[in-house]
Amino acid sequence: MADMSEAQTPGDHGEPFHPAGRYLVDTLAADAPSCPDDATIQLAGRVVLWRRFGSLAFGHLQDRSGKVQISLNKRELDPDQFKVWSKSISLGDFVGVRGHMWTTDKGERTVAVEDLTILNKARLPMPDKWAGVADTELRYRKRYLDLLANEESRARFLLRSQVIARIRSFLEQHGFLEVETPMLQSATSGAAARPFSTHHNALDRDFYLRISPETYLKRVVAGGFDRVYELGRNFRNEGVDSSHLQEFTMLEWYAGYWDYRDNMAFIQELITTVLDDVVGSLQVEYEGMTLDFAPPWPEVDYREAVRDATGIDLTVVSDVEALKEALREHGLLARLGLDDPGDLDQQVSYAGLVDLLYKRTVRPHLVQPCFLTHHPAELVPLARRSDSDPTRLDMFQVVVNGWEIVKAYSELIDPVEQRARLEEQVALREAGDDETMMMEEDFIECMEHGMPPMSGLGLGIDRFVALLTDASTLRDVVLFPQMRDV
């Protein structure tokens, strides 16, 4: 992994080394080459390359902006000072330099060092500058080495920050207020997921890490802030794969007086704006294919897509036992992973079984950006049923590359219907489905005080950034993903 040839330990050149406390910087590495030759500049960073050639020494200094070449010339410095500086520097050291720009015979803009301060020594060797950090496990466990050695990783996380910043500015330009809601919640709702649980010693109460901020954001809307958003972590105690992490970043917003159609137009505008401003194109290359985000995105009807893929009409097959029989008749149990004896009997939720059917037979084939619309009414207990067809929801998802990156709907604001739906969830939980929502009496009481019509939306930041950076797994776009013990 590491290039040991130039590693040195503190104390190799005299007294024990004492790290510096601060260093004044007036220029970034990326800006240095544009400075005129007669300008004095001062910069600091890590030495990622260092070579000595007789009376000359060259290296690369890297800071948050990038790299710049620095040089020591024995003819321009005190000979003893040149000897000490050129031999004291090791790969990985942090140094501060003051000097002026010049251009080498090969045309590379370089900082001619006039004064050098070693700010801190590296006690372990740097990763090899050519191989980088090739071991995938090591890249995730020691991300600091990955960022030092792999330019692709540095660019990916820089783009992630730029995407989040542009999303925030877009929302604020459209009147949205950023708020914060609890990570520790007394009940789980907002998604079908298994939660993490913990105990609050001071309050002597059990809590759950939130799976969604939905009901708390709706409380804020009810309180009078009718356009709000939160960008933060959610936690779901479920499986890990290339498109799922148990700790992930979600953007969620709620807009009073909107319906799901307003959110469809708004998310399309937001995503295309981010691509234009950050990526520079509405076409994104991902694993050898071109994903075209140019609007308008097509609409795919959920029940029609399931019927076309499986032959099962969800407008007719509308309860869990009928759906189980249809799955048997159409020979779909193996495709759904339910072919072992007893697997199908364990499915107690119609919504859960429909969702599994869709995810195994339809979603993998939705590659180009599209709106998936009009989900069966049983799927989301917090969503509003359609006035024109109460068996479906005023809801959509944005699906790209077989990944759900957005879920949104017109919100249910009737407390009587909301209580009935949550009671159904409680009954399913008692029957063995541990991914259902819990009753929230305080939320129901908030609804009884009155809520405006609204539509909410969730955008998975990790999945979105992975698509924009050609990352095959979400761990590539999360700085410190959770890993198994070794």
Image (cartoon, rainbow, N blue to C red):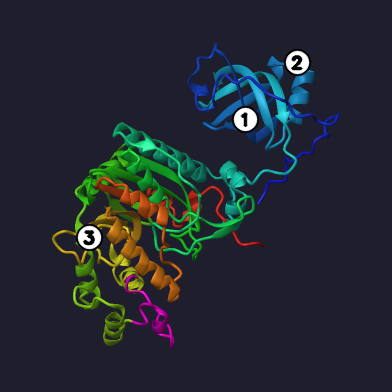
Residue at horizontal 48 percent and vertical 54 percent from the top:
210
Horizontal side of 40 relative to 346 (left or right) equals right
Eye-nearest disc, 2 or 1? 1
Circle 2 packing at 10 Å, graded few (<14), some (14-19), many (20+), is few
Q: Is residue 210 above or below residue 106?
A: below
Q: Earlier in the sequence, mark 2 or mark 1?
A: 1
x, y (%) of residue 373? 23, 59
Location of residue 383 (image quadrant) = bottom left
x, y (%) of residue 83? 77, 24
Circle 2 residue: 78
Q: Earlier in the sequence, mark 1 or mark 3?
A: 1
Q: Amino acid at mark 3?
A: Arg
Q: Which disc is residue 322 wearing?
A: none
Circle 3 residue: 385
Q: Amino acid at mark 2?
A: Asp
Quadrant of the snapshot with the C terminus:
bottom right
Circle 3 packing at 10 Å, graded few (<14), some (14-19), many (20+), is many
